[in-house]
Image: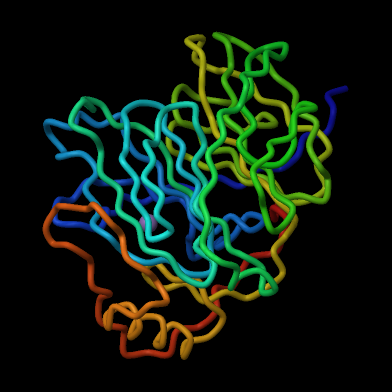
Amino acid sequence: MDEPRTPVEIITPREVPLGGPRAMTVRRSLPQKARSLIGAWCFVDHYGPDDVDETGGMVVPPHPHTGLQTVSWLFAGEVEHRDSGGVHAMVRPGEVNLMTAGHGIAHSEVSTAGTTSLHGVQLWVALPDGSRDVPRHFEHHVPEPLGVPGGMLRVLLGSLGGVTSPVRTYSPLVGAEVVLEPGGRLELDVDPAYEHGLLVDTGSVALEGTVLVRGELGYTGVGAERLALEDLDGTGSRALLIGGAPFGEDIVMWWNFVARTHDEIVGMREQWNARAERFGEVEGYDGTPTWLPAPVLPHVVLRPRVNAPNAVSS
Ligand code: MN
């Protein structure tokens, strides 16, 4: 008899133009109406491979964040990052860059002149209430590839396959790149207290027997102790595993801010547009516009994201 399989919910991305004067398109799989969070992961953008000659690449002038961490992970290309914490860093494939906005940060992101193909993900992690006002900071880590039967892992955040990332998180989380050999089958021991999502970047993957194609995010609820992944098209696959303990706090997300109430968002927006000290200054960005003003708020009271149960309904 076959082992019972963990049920998987398929989250389909939607195409969204990225902010900035030129509109590079990304595939956004979180947040969605049906599901807002996976652990503290609250935002998943997947892009490329894009021919930069056609798309113009990534040109995002200085803009703010609050109450979150951004995780940048590239498969191809290079992005120049500058932030108001005084960090000037190159984001490169295989290197995790984690920016903690905390109380407030501003940053710019521009693909470099030498980049012909741009391919990667940007993810956000919501900070829990007790940590969301921490001072801004930035971490860089190059995970050692870990060979496992059927493929290879790179652990960005948290622990997987016996490897623990030194990158600081504020809630129990995991994030890892998973590469499957052609026809490879891989079993991952995971924390049953976590819910998980698998974003397929290339190839197609059976996650616990559920077929996921490129761009899809397969969600598993809490309770799974092991996840089976299999490359389906025989050419190899690459995916990103995210997971964490159910976040358990209601968040209000608008534009680049994560808060708890509508009024907080109103205040953050006003402070950014008034160029308040809360966000600091990005030095060395020489593009135009020199910063991105926050858009007009909708004429409704912003409500917390309603999260679905931390289980897959069957
Ligand atoms: Mn940003």
At 57% from the left edge and 20% from the top edge, which residue is drawn?
A: 179
Q: Position of residue 24 (x, y in %)?
A: 22, 46
At 77% from the left edge and 34% from the top edge, which residue is drawn?
A: 5
Q: Could you say which quadrant of the image residue 147 lies in? A: top right
- The total number of labels drawn is 0
Q: Position of residue 96 (x, y in %)?
A: 52, 37
At 37% from the left edge and 69% from the top edge, which residue is drawn?
A: 280
Q: Could you say which quadrant of the image residue 78 lies in? A: top left
Q: Is residue 149 left or right of residue 88?
A: right
**Ligand 1: which quarter?**
bottom left
Q: Position of residue 175 (x, y in %)?
A: 62, 40
At 12% from the left edge and 34% from the top edge, which residue is drawn?
A: 54
Q: Is residue 278 above or below residue 83?
A: below
Q: Position of residue 261 (x, y in %)?
A: 53, 85
Q: Is residue 179 above or below residue 246?
A: above
* Residue closest to the eye, 36 or 175: 175
* Residue closest to the eye, 169 or 210: 169
Q: Could you say which quadrant of the image residue 115 lies in? A: top left
Q: Is residue 177 left or right of residue 17?
A: right
- Furthest-right residue in view? 1
Quadrant of the drawing holding the N terminus: top right
Colour scheme: rainbow
